[in-house]
Structure formats: structure tokens, C-alpha cells
Amino acid sequence: MKGTFRASMAVVHTTLGLVTGWVLFAIALSGALSVFRREISLWARPELSTSVSSPLLTDAHALDWLNRNASTASAWYVGSATDLCSFATALWPDTKGKYIQRALDPETGSPDGIRDTLGGEFFYRFHFELQLPHPWGRLIAVLAALALIVGLVTGIIIHRRIFADFFTFRPSRGQRSWLDTHNLLGVAALPFHLMISFTGAVTLGSLLLPWSTQALYRNDVTASYTELNPALYSRPASGHAGHLAPILPMLQEADRHFGGTGLEQIYVFNPSDQASLVTVIAGNSHTVSTSSQIITFDGPSGHILREHIEKRPIIRAYTFLYGLHVARFAPRVTRWLYFLSGLALAALIGSGMHLWILKRLRRPHHLGHRIVARLNVGVLMGTPLAFASFFIANRLLPVTMPHRAGWEVTTVFIVWGSTLAYTLVRNPERTWAELLGGNAAACFLIAALSLPWHGSIVAGVGLTALILSASFAFATYHRIRKTGLLA
């Protein structure tokens, strides 16, 4: 640490950025994409219509199909159709205990003919799990969120002219321009950066502070979960065969109790047993908070067993912060602001990492600095290229390919790993231009594969990809011109 407080904070800021920067960049970029999680999921399934006739009927068709084809499963977990998402998604265990996840046709309730893909769910889960086993991915994500909070606060402290920096940008000045870019991105969306990092840390905070729950419930996770959600409970199977009452009347009854908020999720436990339960969770598209009301029905009779409206202040505070983070409440304009601010956060982190490299390479440096410089290009340019490959694989892989969703995800990591390996053996000056050009080509291909742009969602994805392609192409031209690679 240095002699003055500001200098000491600069050391903290730089160290945290260096240690967590690459992970935070991937988290921020995937988080920006997950803002349009449902839209990406619809784009990824062109077989489905984007119009919603009746969400309740869609959900009833999905549950009827599960009743005919997965009645022996221990539970069904159904994500309800909404005004933004025309289909229901279902998760259920097979006979070997392995979970199957499928999108279900709004008219028939069947997954037949719909390509197997995670869609926007991949970016949503990657954002806080990093494709790692539980709890390691989430633990890394929450530690990175804490590091981001400290990094933002120390960044505010070390910048004497933080508000003047908002109006300062000097182009074509090398390292000075990168510093101006870093400062401008940090100030322009500072309230969003602070909010999203704080709410992200709170959302996964129980991973960092699990001891109170362990002391109170003696490691009985079920008891703690039941107390948090009084109407969301389970009971053991009776061992006697049973049948579910008609599903649609239960969904309509729940919708009336929810007062028009719609449905968010539907859980059915032990569907072929006399002790079956149907739990319906209210939608939250009109409020910031999440999971405000839950109803549980007796499966065979269809009678309400429990209903809970969340009024506890501490739980409401938590669901409010969580709702701010996931932005399910947000109208379209607000979600675009979330998306653009998320991209700004990724650019802020990336510019900070590149600035660290520029400073080190101008001084006497060693092999470690050169390796980090190459890997930095691989992460900053390889991550968007890898994410773009997910969209490309979605269109190019055969629709009937076995384990197709897994191969889409595998494609991301093959491209990512190949990019990192490539940058290790190439000159960073050349790889910057090459990978910028690769991103431009990948985004243009996404726009082309989206043709014809029928519907606002497909057109939105295609147009966004085209704008990103043009941005990467401009950056490629600027990089080539600056470094004289064509000379």
C-alpha cells in the first residue's frame, strides 16, 4: 500500500481489476445478453410463433402433454407462457433421474418439431454460474460482484475530476485516450454499475454468509425453504395411484387470486399419486419485486390448500433488490437501457484491463506481461466471438441432432478455447485486428441467418447483430489503419 489514502485505493482498484477483470468481463457481457433472455429464446426457436393467444391455455396444453407423457416423473417444473414469451418451458426428471428441459408448443403442448436449445437461458445461467458445478460458479460470481463494488468505490475515490471526466475524451492519444474511455464509461452509467453489482452480491449473499441459516435450521434446507415460502411446500407420495383434476380451472382460479398479474411458474409434485400438489407462482412483470404470491392446490381435487401473499419487510426488501437485478418488471425501453448499460460495464472492465497492459508494456517488462497481453486479447475479443458462435450454432446445427442443446454450449467453449490458444502464438497487434474482424463477420452472419426478419423479435436480434457488426468492422478498420498492418 502507498503513503496516501488515494494512492492506496489506486492499488486496491488496480489489483482487484487484475485479479477479477476477465471473469467480470464475461459476467457483464452475458448479463447484458440475459436482459433479453426471453427474446433470444424465441429467436432460437423459429419453429414457434411469437404471438401469444392465451398464456393460460398454453400452460394447460403443456401440463396435459406432461400428464400423458411424463406421468411417472416425481415433479414437473413449468415456466409459464407470458405476453413476452409465447410458449411454456418444462423441466422434469426421466427414469434415470436426469433432468430434461424442453420448450412446448403453444397449441399441442408437445416438444416435437422444436429444436433442442437453451436459447437465452444459456446466457442467464452463465451469468451467475459460469457453466461450473454448484456452488463453485455462483461462489466465483458473488466474489466477483463484491470485487466490482469495491472497484467502483475505489475508482470514485481515486478520480479527483470524476464529473469533469464525463465531458473529457481526447481521441488518437494512445494510452491517454484509453484512460479517458475508461473514465467516461465509469461515470456515464455509474448508478447502474453500483446498483447491478450490489444487487448481484445480495442475490447470492447466502453463499458468503451461510452460518445463520445453518445455526437456525441445523442444515435442514427444506425447513428454511418452507419458511421462506410458506405456500410452497411438499408432502410425501402416498404410494397410491391418483389422477390430477383438470388443470385449466386451477390455473384460472390462481389467476383470479393474483389479480391479473399472470403466472410465472407452475410446479406439480408427484403428479400420478393421490398426494399430488399443484403450486402456482404469480407473475411479476408489473412490479419490481418477485414471487409476491403463491397458491398450492390439492392435485386430485383441485381445492386450494395454502395461499401466501408476501408481506414480511425483510423478504420484500430482498425480492425488490433481486427484481431490480433481473429486470423482469422493466418495459422495453428500460430493458434496452439495462442492455446498453451492461455493455458499457463490459467495456469499462475491458478498457481497464487493456489500460493496465498498455502501462506495463511501455516500461521494461517481462515474459509474464507479454503473456497477459496476449491472453487479454483472447478474453476481450474471444468472449463476444464465443457468445456469437452460440447464435450461429443454433441456426447451423441440424434440428434433429441428438443432445443438440449441449452441442450449442460446447461450441461456445470450443471457440473460446481456440481463440485463447490462437492469441498465445500470435502478435497481439495482429490478433486485435484479426479478432475484431472475426467478431464483425460473426455478427453479420447472425444477422444473415435471421433472415427473413419476420416479427419484431427476429428483426430486433438481426438489426442488433448488424449494428454490432458495423461497430466491430469500424474498430477493425481503425485498428488496421493505426498499426499500419496493410502497409
Image: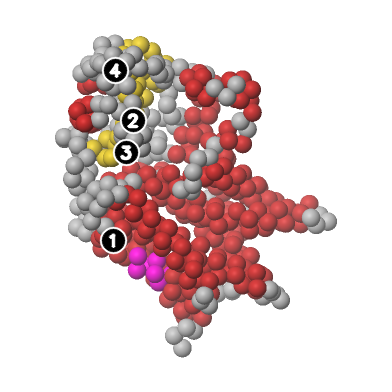
Dominant secondary structure of the magenta stretch? helix
- The label nearer to you, 2 versus 4, is 4
412 left or right of 145? left
Q: Where is residue 306 in the image (x, y as percent from the top left)?
A: 38, 13
Q: Do the residues labelled 2 and 4 touch (CB within 8 Å)?
A: no
**Residue under pointer 4:** 273
Q: What element does badge 1 sit on?
A: helix
Q: Which mark is residue 100?
A: 3
Kindly identify the amino acid type of the residue bearing the numbered disc 1: Ala
Q: Residue 447 carries which label?
A: 1
**Residue under pointer 2:** 77
The CA span between labels 2 and 4 is: 16 Å
The magenta span reads 436-442
Q: Which of marks 1 and 2 is nearer the N terminus?
A: 2
What crowding class fits label 4: few (fewer than 14 Cα within 10 Å), some (14-19), or many (20 or more)? many
Q: Which of marks 4 and 3 is nearer the N terminus?
A: 3
Q: Where is residue 419 in the image (x, y as percent from the top left)?
A: 46, 67
